[in-house]
Amino acid sequence: MNNSSHLSTVYREKFALVADLYHLTMAYGFWKNDMQDRPSVFQLYFRRNPFGNPYAIATGLGLVVDYLQQLRFSVEDIHYLGSLNGADGLPLFEIGFLNYLQRLEFKCDVYAVPEGTAVFPNQPLIRVEGPLLQAQIIESALLNLVNFSTLIATKAARVVQAAQGDQILEFGLRRAQGLDGAITASRAAYIGGCDATSNLIAGKYYHIPVKGTHAHSWVMSYGNEAAAYRGFAKAMPNNCIFLVDTYDTINGIKNAIEIGKELRENGHSLLGIRLDSGDLSALSKTARKMLDEAGMTETAIVASDCLDENSISKLKKDNAPINIWGVGTELITGGTQAALGGVYKLAAIQDSKGTWEYRIKKSEDLYKMSNPGIHQVRRYFDSAGVPQADVLFEVSHLEPAKELIEMASGTVYPLPSSMNFEDLLIPVFKHGKLIYAQPDVHQVRERSLQQQAMMQHAKAHFVHGLDRYLYDLKQDFAQKS
């Protein structure tokens, strides 16, 4: 298998305890009540698009695959669980249950939307079918791995689209939410469309291109800006991008040009200058003029300084001649949105006679009401291959759609039965065994970029909702007490 997540490599740890306590107390309850092997179906989805974007980029499946392949309770895990006590001071779990956990082998079927796919609210990104105890205890881990990755990949896609084809460098390591947040976010940002990262450990494990310049401290350590640039050029003549705003930006540009001429005399070139503060539009225009007058028309202008898709869009509208964008804090953390808000809900369970019983999560907040049943997402395309609609089906009623219900307005949209379609949820695990040929991170990124391009063409008329059968089924369940 081409391992594109490397969780087990980075952390060298089993992950069964990546769970909330209530997952283990429920597991214990299922075991005590002989419900642990009851066939069940859980579905992972999100309720609202992040950042107000028209869609999200599904990301994190590679991490999920690695996690599920490593799903075992170690001896140390069992000893830890055995040390937990209830309110009466007695052990929380009995020894028989702990022995059961230590022998546990993952046996679920897993269906998922491939990473890099454009997805929409209330569509399952992952469907898990299998023994109730097993399908339940993986909830928090799956949400952790998918929510954050999908959030950051979607943010990256917004940044990339704002840059209109310019290079995007992810510079977020120092501002990320911990070491794991940085590694996971670098991977997700690359999938979303960033060209490279400054994060070396992400580069090592995910084979993401790495790029970087130098810090203000390099210039400050010399005390003389020209000498600092000259020292860097001596050390790395083939990698010179000078940070020009440590003291005075215009003088910094002049000093960069001076050393750039020396580089040229020695058979090298000044790759770029970086602007990290001030009026980036005005400064970049001045820098471009100065560089061009010096014959350095190929020298790039790199901008950083708390950029996001909105500030980049504004600079593009101002015709700022910036070629490369270094985006850090606002990308690596999600910026204005801290979390995706994905959920993992029980959708169906078999009774003691083997009959499927559908489940619905009801709420006074209608957007929190789940869809009952076992679902597939079918995407329809026109003859040019442009997506037209996503329809959520109950798998027992996967028939050519005659109509699509858009839940927000109740409008009925006809869909020709001859329209081409793709079922988005594909088999990943069968009885706990991986059957999915996992793509590497570069292939996932390519899919993401293709999906973004398709959605740009589709956005004027694309709709999504429930097919008639599932719509009626949900209405029936919602009316029950």
Image: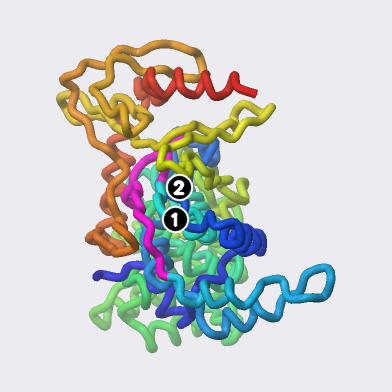
| Residue 205, quarter of the rendered image | bottom left
Which residue is outermost to the right?
88
Q: Which residues are magenta?
A: 105-125
Taking the image as shown, residue 34 lies to the left or right of residue 291, namely right
Asked if the stretch drawn in magenta spans residue 123, the answer is yes
The residue drawn where x is 78% and y is 69% is: 86
The residue drawn where x is 44% and y is 52% is: 153
Q: Amino acid at mark 2?
A: Ser
Q: Dot 2: within a 10 Å radius of its alpha carbon, few (fewer than 14), some, or many (20 or more) residues?
A: many
Question: Dot 2 corresponds to which residue?
Answer: 40
| Nearer the observer, 355 or 169 | 355
Residue 286 pos. (x, y %): 47, 53
Residue 131 tag number: 1
Taking the image as shown, residue 454 lies to the left or right of residue 419, namely right
Q: Amino acid at mark 1?
A: Pro
CA–CA distance in space, label 1 to label 2? 6 Å
The residue drawn where x is 33% and y is 41% is: 452
| Residue 417, quarter of the rendered image | top left
Dominant SS type (magenta): loop
SS of the residue at dot 2? Answer: strand
